[in-house]
Image: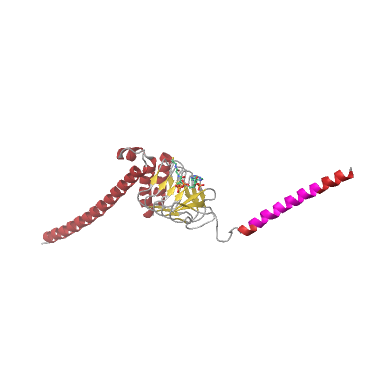
Amino acid sequence: MDYEKKLEELGVKAVRAYDRFDDGLTVAAKKLRRLAMSVKDDVRAVRERDPAARSDAEVLLLYPGFHALMAYRVSHALHEKEHYFAARAVSQAARCVTGIEIHPGATIGTGLVIDHGMGVVIGETAEIGDNCTLYQGVTLGGTGKDVGKRHPTLGDNVLVGSGAKVLGPFKIGSGAKIASNAVVLEEIPENATAVGIPAKVVRRKGQRVNDLDQIHIPDPVAARMQQLESRLAELEAELEKLKNNDNETDGK
Ligand SMILES: CC(C)(COP(=O)(O)OP(=O)(O)OC[C@H]1O[C@@H](n2cnc3c(N)ncnc32)[C@H](O)[C@@H]1OP(=O)(O)O)[C@@H](O)C(=O)NCCC(=O)NCCS
């Protein structure tokens, strides 16, 4: 009798263990599927935006930007599970191999392309939307003055040119382009192009932006008056010179 009861208990335990194993497998399969999809998206993004990428195999094996992104996906998952040391270790190992430093705490959407990559730094509180492109030497960093959120937030489809520095916890609107070597210190609106140090918006939706603002509008009447005044001064000086010459000739 005891034997039968024990057998029944064992059977129930076995069924429960199997259910747990099955649930675990389902979760793992879902996670693997999600990972495979994001790898596929990342490869597709490089193929779409880098004309030099000739095959998926080339991207998978030979693109440091892609490798850094894969390492980030692992380090970010560890960071989310609060395994901070392991997360940082993965991120630093990837930095040694690729020259690209992505903090595990950064939030990165799908389809990011880091082209060439060497010298790219992405800070802990940086956020990057979908389908963005960063070239070599880009810093998404802080100014050192902020606490908490210290790094920029990029919308979708943002391009940041080589050597550009985006410093501070502000937004770069979706579709914006940051020119190479620009230093961006304030928010950039959607679909704008910003160039220079400090960066200024020079195009909005492809249209040239007039440098004027609503406060410092030049007064054309005042400008004309100034021109007339300086012309009058020149004429007066010339008249004075002629008078002096006449006096000298009369004296002789
Ligand atoms: C800014 C950029 C994205 C072009 O954007 P765009 O919206 O098409 O802008 P335009 O080319 O019309 O240029 C707008 C103005 O900014 C100027 N400009 C463009 N890039 C600039 C730069 N890096 N620094 C300073 N001025 C720049 C242009 O001369 C133009 O000036 P204008 O208004 O006097 O005519 C592009 O010039 C760039 O910097 N891309 C980065 C690419 C890169 O990093 N490549 C590295 C590959 S290894």
What percent of the width, then of the height, locates residue 144?
A: 53, 53
- State the residue in front, 7 or 49: 49
- In screen coordinates, is 92 left or right of 48? right
Quadrant that contains the N terminus? bottom left
Q: How is the image coloured?
A: secondary structure
Q: How many marks?
A: 0
- State the residue in front, 89 or 212: 212
Note whether 3 is above or below 45 in the view shown: below
What percent of the width, then of the height, locates residue 169?
A: 48, 56
Quick check: is 228 in the magenta stretch?
yes
Note whether 22 is above or below 101 in the view shown: below
Q: Is residue 245 visible?
A: yes
Quadrant that contains the C terminus? top right
Picture quadrant where residue 13 is located: bottom left
What percent of the width, then of the height, locates residue 242?
A: 79, 47
Toward the front, the furthest residue is 250
Q: Is residue 81 visible?
A: no
Residue at figure coordinates x 61%, y 58% from the top left: 220
Note whether 215 is above or below 33 in the view shown: below
What percent of the width, then of the height, locates residue 181?
A: 50, 45
Specify start and end residues of the magenta stretch as a single range.
223-242
The secondary structure that most of the magenta stretch takes on is helix
- State the residue in front, 133 or 21: 133
Residue at figure coordinates x 70%, y 55% from the top left: 229
Quick check: is 89 in the magenta stretch?
no
Residue at figure coordinates x 34%, y 40% from the top left: 59
- In screen coordinates, is 7 left or right of 235? left
- In screen coordinates, is 250 left or right of 3? right
- State the residue in front, 184 or 32: 184
